[in-house]
Amino acid sequence: MTSKHYVLPTDLTGWKPRDNTGEVHFTWDYDSGREKMLNLYDKGKRRQWDAKIRIDWDQTIDRNNPLETDDYYLPIWGSAMWEELDESRRSELRLHLGAWQFSQFLHGEQGALICAAKIVQNVPDIDSKFYAATQVMDEARHVEVYTTYLNKLGLAYPINPSLKALLDDIVSDSRWDMTYLGMQVLIEGLALAAFGLIRSLTGSTLARTITSYVMQDEARHVSFGRNALKDYYPELSSSERNEREEFCAEACFLMRDRFLGHEVWETLGMNTQECVKWVEGSEMQLTFRRLLFTRIVPVLKDVGLFGSTMQNALDKIGVLGFSSVDIDNVIAEDERIAQEIDASRVSQVDEIIGYANS
Ligand SMILES: [Fe+2]
Ligand SMILES: [Fe+2]
């Protein structure tokens, strides 16, 4: 509760004006805040960074293989369609797959920017408004980073229809918890896992650096969503929780189908049906698609959305086993890797300054 003495109690003067996207929550209780939320807010303020300074944008990108990954990890590697391609077509495919993947990150980041701003507006508590404000800045930076990267690459793809459908559901729902659930838990959880795969497989220092720095911010965002929902969901009725589980189940199927690459096969004039069929059936790609749920499943369990609807859907996708992943450990590791990269950047800068002064 507030420690200020108001002439009228805050619950009598509460104000929720409406704009055409739903309720706008004002609060006059500026002083109460949950410690864990305020700690995240403080961390968010301390960890702001400038993408222009922290990232060395002079590094070149190999347009024949932007992510410098082994061909073995490409979606159609090992198929007859791959064997038919000569080296120049293979280079073109690597370029397009990289551009497609990073374009989806870019569009997803814009979605996160809009959702974070929406949370500032719709969430009732001041501590959550504070934290979401730091997230707005983080997401703007992520949009800047991926835009700069794609400008350097010189190629971009429009938003994938499954990602667009999911974003549409999230932004058109005015309930603040649905914004958290859809964006902070599902879309960001999936993006974090995809970033994690890139971070471990890429040979490009630029791609690894970008990904690690963005992941450091995203880990805070997922923690925020998780803390807020963990406090809120026990207050809901079982039918209200079930509605959320149904939404998540549908979203998980949409997200799984986002990674089949239709747009790339079509753009390159390949046999889209055959390529999609291959990607759907390839053991390696099935493993990749399952790994994308490593960060989502433990959080859904943690916030209390783990009834039969949710468990059945996750079981169908083959990812129910990830419920035992220790998400705190995984997040701590993200933080450690980003700090390690940053420490080596700082020591390089010190070395250059020392050399210039000698
Ligand atoms: Fe982001
Ligand atoms: Fe985020």
Image (cartoon, rainbow, N blue to C red):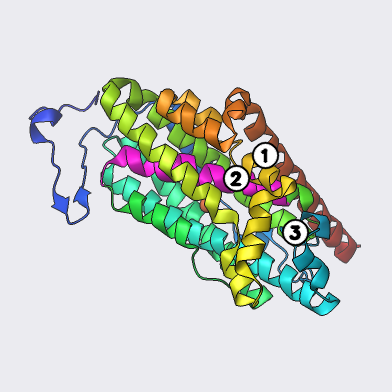
Query: Dot 2 corresponds to which residue?
Result: 192
Q: Residue at x 25, y 46 (%)?
A: 174
Residue type marked 1 = Asp
Marks 2/1 in contact by CB < 8 Å: the verdict is yes
Could you tell me which quadrant the N terminus lies in?
A: top left
Say above or below: 127 vs 263.
above
Q: Answer yes or no: do the residues labelled 3 and 1 have beta carbons within 8 Å?
A: no
- Location of residue 43 in the rendering, given as x and y in whole percent from the top left corner: 53, 38
Residue for badge 1: 334
* Residue drawn where x is 70% and y is 47% of the image: 197
Q: Nearer the viewer, mark 3 or mark 1?
A: 3
User: Which of label 2 and label 1 is nearer to you?
Assistant: 2
User: Mark 3 highlights which residue?
Assistant: 74
Q: Nearer the viewer, residue 162 or 324?
A: 162
Residue 227: image x %, image y %? 44, 29
User: Which span of residues is magenta-colored?
Assistant: 174-198
Q: Residue at x 80, y 74 (%)?
A: 85
Whether residue 266 is in magenta: the answer is no
Q: Could you tell me how far apart the alpha carbons at marks 2 and 3 are, in whole angstroms?
A: 19 Å
- What SS does tag 1 mark? helix
Depth check, front residue: 104 or 199: 104
